[in-house]
Amino acid sequence: MQKTIFNITKMDCPSEENLIRMKLDGIPNIANLDFDIPNRILTVFHRGEIEQIEKSIIELNLGGKKISTEQTELTSFDENLNQKKLLWTVLAINFAFFLIEMTTGLISKSMGLVADSLDMLADSFVYGISLFAVGGTLTRKKRIAKLAGYFQITLAIIGFIEVLRRFFGTERLPDFSTMIIVSIFALIANGICLYLLQKSNSKEEAHMKASMIFTSNDVIINLGVIAAGLLVNWLNSNKPDLIIGTIVFALVIQGAIRILKLSK
């Protein structure tokens, strides 16, 4: 048995972990994958050559780089019995906030909240693909990934069109207080999700968990919507909301393209 360690510089949260698991699924010589998200380290336990595994990781464009390969005496691995339960929990939280942010975003006329709701939906897709495809064939997983990717892109394009309409139109100002309050709750929800998914690594230092949470893309997006809400009120303009909405829609499309690559 061999142990190869990779540094994945863009592995900010469990969404990237699930993408990597999907990409490596079906490679027969992999015995186990061990993820250390705070330190952005992936340890692959495998038999035989590492070339196919390394190529697959590089193709994800997550900044994957092989650090070392060495022999290991470890041959058996404990399965995390709580993994499915945790995935169902974070899936439920993300999908619930997709509904909350989409509803409040439409009511408050905030494209920032609408865009952030799609980011929550994107995370739900990644967790859902991992859950619903467990035990299924690689073909089935790719089919689900393709459906999810195209659906995300469609919603994001509709969002872009709406941003353009509002930019050149005379739409009333979004409700900045709703933007801020809902985004604060979404920020808390993302923190809970990331904590739950790292719960099994209870020996990790508290500051490492905090570092992982506050460097994740989801948290940055939440803070961006809060900042946009403050600027909407200060400048008496809907432009900050439209700008953050555009940025998040672009991130959603980027994530969707990443998922579509897995379906090829």
Image (cartoon, helix red, strand yellow):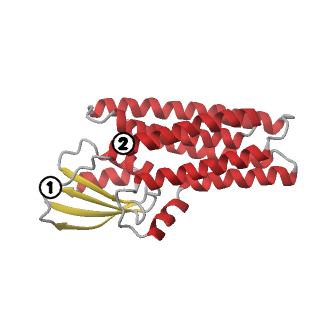
Give how far across and how far down residue 248 sits, in percent. Answer: 62, 46
Q: Is residue 251 left or right of residue 204?
A: right
Report which quarter residue 138 is drawn in. Answer: top left
Give residue 258's mark: none
Which of the pair 58/212 is nearer the observer?
212
Instruction: Tell me the CA gap for discs 2 and 1.
Output: 23 Å
150 lies above or below 16: above
Give how far across and how far down residue 34 sits, in percent. Answer: 29, 57
Q: Which residue is mark 1?
A: 76
**First in sequence: mark 2 vs mark 1:** 1
Name which residue lies at 35% across and 32% down. Answer: 132
Report which quarter residue 106 is drawn in. Answer: top right
Q: What crowding class fits label 2: few (fewer than 14 Cα within 10 Å), some (14-19), or many (20 or more)?
A: few
Q: Of the residues tagged 2 and 1, which is closer to the observer?
A: 2
Which of the pair 198/259 is nearer the observer?
198
Name which residue lies at 25% across and 51% down. Answer: 52
Name which residue lies at 14% across and 62% down. Answer: 74
Question: Which quadrant of the figure contains the C terminus?
Answer: top left
Which of the pair 14/1 is nearer the observer?
14
Q: Secondary structure at mark 2?
A: helix
Question: Which quadrant of the figure contains the N terminus?
Answer: bottom left
Q: Give amino acid for label 1.
A: Ser
Q: Is residue 61 visible?
A: no
Q: Is residue 116 visible?
A: yes
Q: Is residue 162 left or right of residue 58?
A: right
Name which residue lies at 41% across and 36% down. Answer: 128
82 lies above or below 209: above
Q: What crowding class fits label 1: few (fewer than 14 Cα within 10 Å), some (14-19), or many (20 or more)?
A: few
Q: Which residue is mark 2?
A: 85
